Image (cartoon, grey):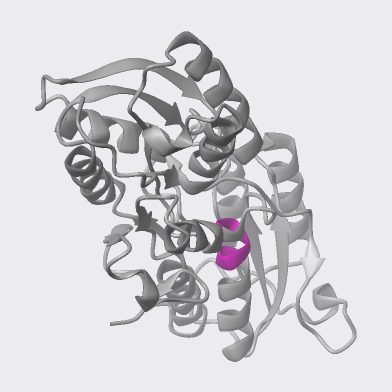
Amino acid sequence: MRKRKGLAVIAFSSAMLLGLAACSGDDGDSSDSADGGNGEGGGEEGGLITIIVNDPSNPYWKTEGDVASAAAEELGYETTVGAHEGDSNKENNLIDTAISNQSAAIILDPQDADGSIGAVQKAIDADIPVFLVNAEINESGLAKAQLVSNNAQGAALSAEQWVELMEESGEYVELFGAPSDNNAQTRSNGYETVITQYPDLDKQGEEVADWDRTKGHDKMQSLFQSSPDIDGVISGNDEMALGAIAALKEADAFDDIIVGGFDGSPDAIDSIKDGELAYTVLQPVAEFAEAAVEMADDYIKNGTEPEEEKQAFDCILITPDNVDNMVENFTYEE
């Protein structure tokens, strides 16, 4: 068996916000001053922009909401930030509230690639433009834009780094994100494309952990019980990976197992600095959250349609060699 490196490799984040929270407005009631939706664009400036993310208990989604809100307020809008927490009913209720509050635009991280289509359609029918961030829906031509990380490119970065750290051989398991999110399958496919080129890497199992740290911990316990001789773990996000590390530590096995991650969350960055997580892949969530607001603003004020509906933002591999270039809000500076 090769010499172990004592690093950990993880992938992608999980965990979440808590319902609608007004983020601006002098009197705390943003709905009072909303100018109303404008499906044709080129309307009055200002008004309310509703931002709906997944779950702000996860720093990734919290950053998404915080950055979008700050960008909108900088441009003169009032904002509310809500969280559907992976629940389609909550998402629909938040969309209904955005409509009743006459939002000028909605920034939405969709709950489900198929299930969120109806929610987006409802907003469009109310003449409110929708700009999607982080995840896509399986229908084009509804949202004005769908801005996501380049998950295929990021998965390739992750898998190539992980294979190198594994020295191209060994037994491993995978932690898979929420199946309702197309990003989970895209990342897993990207991992497989790279890893299957190395016949001495042997996959022992896979578990769905829904982007969640606690589930990552529990699923890792189960995987380790059935496959105690694994050499590596590759994860769909940082939260699941950090949960796996915790479980492996409890089993006194972590020093012998490489874990790899995805997202670039603050806890993942700290874990890399502590010599535990081997790497993460930074998703430029701050960049595309701000870009979505700028597109919404341009559409509201000028009627400008984004040049392309679907836009992918490249990811960055974060290792011990460049981890000090990470700054707050999932931002990398050279």
Instruction: Say if 194 sits above or below 295 in the image.
Output: above
Residue 157 percent location from the top left of the image: 22, 50
Quarter occupied by the C terminus: bottom left
Q: Residue at x 88, y 79 (%)?
A: 28
Total count of labels: 0
Residue 22 percent location from the top left of the image: 80, 71
Instruction: Say if 156 sits above or below 323 in the image.
Output: above
Q: Residue at x 22, y 47 (%)?
A: 161
Residue 57 percent location from the top left of the image: 69, 54
Q: Is residue 87 left or right of residue 97?
A: left
Q: Residue furthest top?
A: 226
Quarter occupied by the N terminus: top left
What segment carries the magenta color?
60-64
Residue 272 placement: quadrant: bottom left
Q: Is residue 271 left or right of residue 97?
A: left
Task: Provide the major secondary structure of the magenta segment.
Answer: helix
The answer to whether any part of residue 116 appears in the image is no
Q: Residue furthest right?
A: 27
Instruction: Say if 206 sits above or below 49 in the image.
Output: above
Q: Residue at x 52, y 39 (%)?
A: 245
Front in this rendered view, residue 99 or 54: 54
Q: Residue at x 41, y 44 (%)?
A: 11
Front in this rendered view, residue 326 or 37: 326
